[in-house]
């Protein structure tokens, strides 16, 4: 008969072989577990200072590669409108779309008021239809682009997006125990999770500046959270890049981000769970007297087989 102690020893030996650890600790029973048709799902909540993540299947879920953004808000008569159109760039102060008049009127036109420098602009109300120099709206003189007091004729959000392109941000590379890709993990064992490329391009913060004509915009990007989809129905949020595992850290749970599978992946067609890490980027930008935020996501995947240890008891 194989005793309970002998069975634990078998599990420990296999776990050490998988992870390359120098020792193995006894497993604590998982907290907040619930039974599902496919097995047990365990929930653990933690903040950025420690714990195993905030697990849920609700608002934090996302499609890989999904994007969203909060750009500058332009309003007219109390309603939000597009900040750019064929009419030009919306001026919140003037409450009209602004663009240069082309061709400009001759210098003896009254609009110049005797000036020999600057630029003539067209101010067109929202909903107008015109070609510059005709239609409804009015002309006005202002300093030329690049000079103090000149209207902004470049959408700063577009310039901010160019600054983001210059950052050359990278999708997350998954770090996970077991360290070797494709090596099986045992049911009930703690898996550590971390982002394996947490530098400026993979996790931030990173700052870049882009310029279009006289308009310069500076943007700073940083990951606000990582959502882990473990493939077994568990989805959890970690507020940091996680803690990389090393043999010196032993067999306990990760202090920042981890998961414990309670069902094997043998019933899957490919014999493995698909683990997806999604980084939620937040970009704060400012320039041309305006500021705003752009948000988007990037994802990386890994296949993780999970197996059970079969203990044979004989009398």
Image: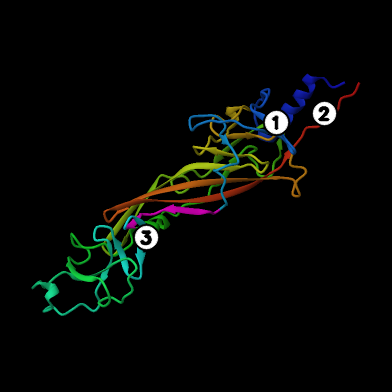
The span picked out in magenta is 65-76
Q: Is 16 in the magenta?
A: no
The residue tagged 1 is 188
Residue 227: % across, % down: 55, 42
Task: Check the image and report above or below for 95 versus 259.
Answer: below
Label 1 sits on a secondary structure element that is loop
Mark 3 neighbour density, 10 Å: few (under 14) some (14–19) many (20 or more) = some
Residue in the picture at 75% in, 24% down = 9
Q: Residue farthest to the right?
A: 315
Q: Is 71 in the magenta?
A: yes
The residue tagged 2 is 311
Residue 1 located left or right of residue 194: right
Counting residues from the N terminus, which is met first, the one under dot 3 or under dot 1? 3
Residue 263 visible from this viewpoint: no
Q: CA distance from mark 3 to mark 1?
A: 54 Å
Label 2 sits on a secondary structure element that is loop
Residue 109 located left or right of residue 258: left
Residue 81 got which mark? 3
Q: CA distance from mark 2 to mark 1?
A: 14 Å
- The mark closer to the camera, 3 or 1, is 3
Residue in the picture at 85% in, 28% down = 312
Residue 135: % across, % down: 28, 76
Front-most of residues 80 and 286: 80
Residue 280 located left or right of residue 164: right
Residue in the picture at 33% in, 61% down = 155
Quadrant in the picture for the N terminus: top right
Residue 121: % across, % down: 22, 70
């Amino acid at each position: 008969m194989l005793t309970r102690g002998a069975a634990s020893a078998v599990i420990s030996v296999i776990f050490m072989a998988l992870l390359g650890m120098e020792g193995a600790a006894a497993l604590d029973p998982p907290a907040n577990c619930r039974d599902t048709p496919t097995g047990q799902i365990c929930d653990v909540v933690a903040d950025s200072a420690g714990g195993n993540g905030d697990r849920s299947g609700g608002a934090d879920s996302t499609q890989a590669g999904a994007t969203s953004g909060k750009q500058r808000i332009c309003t007219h008569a109390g309603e939000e409108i597009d900040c750019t159109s064929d009419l030009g760039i919306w001026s919140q102060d003037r409450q009209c779309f602004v663009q240069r008049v082309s061709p400009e009127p001759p210098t003896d036109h009254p609009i110049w008021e005797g000036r020999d420098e600057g630029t003539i602009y067209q101010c067109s109300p929202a909903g107008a239809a015109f070609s510059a120099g005709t239609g409804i709206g009015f002309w006005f003189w202002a300093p030329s682009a690049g000079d103090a007091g000149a209207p902004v004729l470049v959408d700063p959000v577009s310039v901010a997006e160019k600054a983001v392109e210059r950052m050359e941000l990278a999708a997350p590379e998954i770090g996970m125990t077991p360290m070797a890709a494709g090596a099986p993990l045992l049911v009930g064992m703690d898996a550590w999770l971390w982002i394996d490329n947490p530098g400026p391009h993979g996790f931030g913060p990173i700052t870049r500046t882009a310029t279009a004509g006289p308009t310069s915009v500076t943007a700073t990007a940083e990951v606000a959270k990582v959502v882990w989809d473990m493939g077994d129905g568990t989805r959890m949020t970690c507020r940091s890049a996680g803690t990389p595992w090393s043999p010196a850290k032993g067999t306990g749970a990760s202090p920042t981000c981890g998961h414990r599978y309670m069902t094997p992946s043998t019933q899957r067609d490919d014999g493995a769970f698909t683990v997806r890490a999604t980084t939620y980027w937040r970009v704060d930008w400012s320039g041309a007297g305006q500021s705003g935020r752009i948000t988007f996501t990037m994802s990386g995947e890994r296949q993780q087989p999970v197996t059970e240890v079969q203990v044979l008891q004989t009398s």
